[in-house]
Image: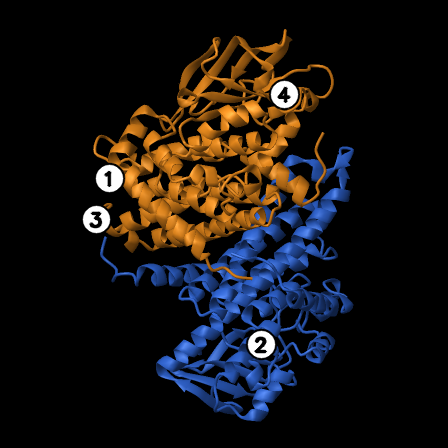
Chain colours: A blue, B orange
Amino acid sequence: MDLHLTDEQRDLIDLFATVADRAGLPAAVREHETLGFAPELWEQLVAVGAPGMGVPADAGGGGATLLDLSLAAETLGARLAPVPLVEHVVAARLLARHADVDPAVQRAAIEGSAIATVALRPAGEDHGVRLVPGGAIASWVIGLDDDQLVAVHDGPPDVAVPNLGSAPLADRALGGVGARTVLARGDAARAAHDAAVDEWRTLTAASLVGLGLGALEIGRAYVIQREQFGVPIGSFQGIQHTLADVSVGLDGAQLLARKAAWALDTEHDDGATLAAGALVFAAEQAQRATERVLHFHGGYGFMQEYDIQLFYRRAKAWPLTLGAPSHEYARLAARRYGPLPEPMAR
Amino acid sequence: MDFAPSEAVEHFRSEVRALLAEHFTDAVRDEVNRTGTIHSWSLHRAMGERGWIREALPEAQGGGGRDPKELAGLFAELELAGAPYDGLSNVVMVSSVLAHVGNDMVKRNVLPRLLSGEALVCLGYSEPDSGSDVAAARTRAVRDGDGWRIDGQKMFTSVAEESEWIFLLTRTSADGPKHAGLTFFLVPMSTPGISLQEVRTLPGKRVNITFLDDVHIGDEWRVGDVDGGWQVMLVALSFERGLAGGVRDAERTLRVVEEWAHRADVDGRRPIDDPVARERLVRLAIETEVADLLTGRAAWVAASGALPGTEGAAARLFASESFTRAASWAIDLAGPEGLVRRQGAPGNLTGFFEQCYRLAPGTTLAGGTSEIQRNLIAQRSLGLPRGR
C-alpha cells in the first residue's frame, strides 16, 4: 500500500479548491437552491477542462484516472458545489467508449458546452426515468430503456423537482422525445450501464467523503469556540469522543473510496464490489457526521441560517438518488453469496 | 497511490501461514485453551528459530529491520489463526526499547535471549488503581544502598507465568507532577519477593496480579534515567511500528461465520439464505475492508519512519468496536446452538460464537481503551482542548 499523492494530484486538489472557494462555496450554495445549479461555477469548471478531464486523451479528453476524478469530486463535495460534475464526467466517459456517437456530441461532452447525465435506474414501461440526477439541466441523458442503452438529446426542463438535497433532479424520458441514439443492446447495454453506475458510485462516495470532512471541520471549529459552563464545549468528552468516531469513520471511507477508484482504474476483479461498498459506507459516515455536527451546534444547528443544515440534507440526498441502501446491500450480497433461493413457505 | 499488497508482504504472510499449519496444530490450540496462558512455546520458538523475532527490530537497533508492513502481516496471520501473540508482542516491544535505551548488561544478557525466542518478558504497567491513568503508578522503587527496593502490585500481567523478566513501571518520586517521578526497571521474575496470583478473564485466558514485596535489585536493572520513565514509555510507543494485534478479530469472525452460514441449519434454513443475515454479513465485510485499510495506513506511516500514533489508535478503535458489534450479532445468528461451549475436540465450530462473545469486551479495553483512543484522536488529530 502506498498512500502518497503525487504533485500532480495535489495540484489537482488545489485547482478545484480554488475554483470552488472563488465561487463563495459552500455559503453561495443558497443562491442556487431552487434549481441546484450554479452556471458561473460550471463555466469556471469548463474553463479548466473539468467536464472532459476523465475522457481518455486519445479521445480528446484530459486522460485523468478515476482516482484523479475522485480527488476532484472529494474537493468539490467538501464545498457542496452545485454542479453535476460527477454525472457529467461519468456520461462523458460512457459516450467516449462508444464509437458510434457523433463526434460533435463527444466534443460537446468533453467541452462541457452541453451537460450530460446518466439515469441511474432503468426506464419504466413508459420510457420515463424518475428523479434523474442532473436531469433538470442536462441536455443529454444516457440510460437503460428496456434492453437498450440510449443517449437522448432533449431540451432540459430547467426546473427541478423540489427535493431534500436542493439538487437538480427531474423526470426525464428515454423514448418518444428528442434525438435518440442507441449505444448498445442486450448484455452489452446492461454491462456498459453497470460500469457507468459503478463509476458514479465511486465518485459519489468520494463526494460524500468530502462532504463529511467539510462537516467535521465545521463541527471542530464550532466546538472549539462555543463555550458553556465556562469552557469550550469541545473539551467535553461526549463531544470529543463522537467527533473522534466521526473522524475515524471518514478516514476509513476516504481510504475505501480511493481504493475503489484505484481498483476500477486497474481493472481489479473486486472494483465493482468496492465501489458499491464505498458508497454505502461513505453515505453512512457522512450522515453520521452531519447529523452529529448539527446536533452539537445546539439550536443554532437547527436554523436554516447556519450552514451545517446544507451538509446534513445533502449527505442523505446524494446517495439516495441511486436507490434504497437495502437494495444496494442486497445487490452486494448477491454478488458475494449468489442469488437468494426461491422463497420458502415458513 | 497504490492499494496492491506488496509481494514481500504476501510472501511473508504465506510463510507465516505455513509455520502456523506446522506449529499451531489443533493439539497446540487445545493446550493453549486448557492452560489459558496467552502464549505457545512451540510456536514462539519456531518463530525465533527462523529469526523472525530478531528481524522485528529496526536495523538501527541491531535487528533484521523487517518492514513494519511485514510485521503487521505477521500479527495479522497470528490473529486470523486465533493464535496467541501476547508473548511475541511483549518481546518485540521491550526488545526495541532495550536496544534503544538499555545498558550494556541487558544488551548482553537479556536482549539475545529475547530475540532468540528462548525467553519472555511481561509488562508491568497497569495496577489495581491505575489502568488508563498509567502515569499514576504507585509501585514504589526506593534507593537501597547501590540498588533498589521495590514494593507494589501490578494488574492484568499477561504471560507473567512464563516470563523471565517483568518490564516494570515504578514511582521513584512522589513530589512534583506524576509523569516526572517514574522509572522503569527490568526485574527478573525469579527475584525473591515476586509472586503471582492467577486471574481468569471472561474467555478463560489467564492473566495475573503480580505482587512485589520487598524486592531487592541492583541498579544495573534500571532501564533509562531515574525519574525518566515517561520518556522510556514514549520510546516504547514509538516502537509500536504499525500494529501488534487487536485488529483482525472481526475479519476472523467474518471468515468463520460466512463459511458456517453456508453449511449450518438454523431452524430449518441456511443462514446464508436469510436476506437479513446477508445484509449484516455484507456490512461486516465492508467494515473488515475498512479496518484492513486503516491498519495498512498505520503500517505505511510506520514504514515511512514516522510514529503512527493517531493512525494506530484509529485502526484499533475501529476494528475493536466493529468486532464487538459482530460478536453480538454472530451469536444471535447462531441461535441457541451458539450458546454451547466448546468441549473436547477442536476443529469444529462448537463454541466459536460463545467464545467470540466472551472475547469481545476485552478488545476495546486492551492496548488502550476505546475512550483513550478517542481522547488521542480528538486531541491530537482534531486539536480539541483537554477537559479539566
| Residue B340 in sight | no
The image quadrant of residue A114 is bottom right
The residue drawn where x is 50% and y is 86% is A151
- Indicate the amino acid at tag 4: Thr
Q: Are the residues flagged by discs 1 and 3 from a single subunit?
A: yes
| Residue A318 in sight | yes
Residue B147 versus residue B343 in the image, above or below: above
Q: How many marks?
A: 4
Calculate the distance from the C-alpha at mark 1 to the C-alpha at mark 3.
24 Å
Q: Secondary structure at mark 1?
A: loop
- Indicate the amino acid at tag 3: Gly
- Indicate the amino acid at tag 2: Gly
Q: Which mark is residue B183?
A: 4
Q: Nearer the viewer, mark 1 or mark 4?
A: 4
- In terms of sequence position, does the residue under pointer 3 or pointer 4 come before the other? 4
Calculate the distance from the C-alpha at mark 3 to the C-alpha at mark 4.
62 Å
Calculate the distance from the C-alpha at mark 2 to the C-alpha at mark 4.
59 Å
Give percent across and percent down for residue B72. Answer: 47, 45
Q: Secondary structure at mark 2?
A: loop
> What residue does disc 2 label?
A54
- In the shown orientation, is residue A233 left or right of residue A265? right
- In the shown orientation, is residue A103 left or right of residue B30? right
Q: Nearer the viewer, mark 3 or mark 4?
A: 4
Calculate the distance from the C-alpha at mark 1 to the C-alpha at mark 4.
46 Å
- Indicate the amino acid at tag 1: Gly
Q: Nearer the viewer, residue B70 or A329?
A: B70
Q: Which mark is residue B268?
A: 3
> What residue does disc 1 label?
B347
The residue drawn where x is 42% and y is 40% is B52
Calculate the distance from the C-alpha at mark 2 to the C-alpha at mark 3.
51 Å
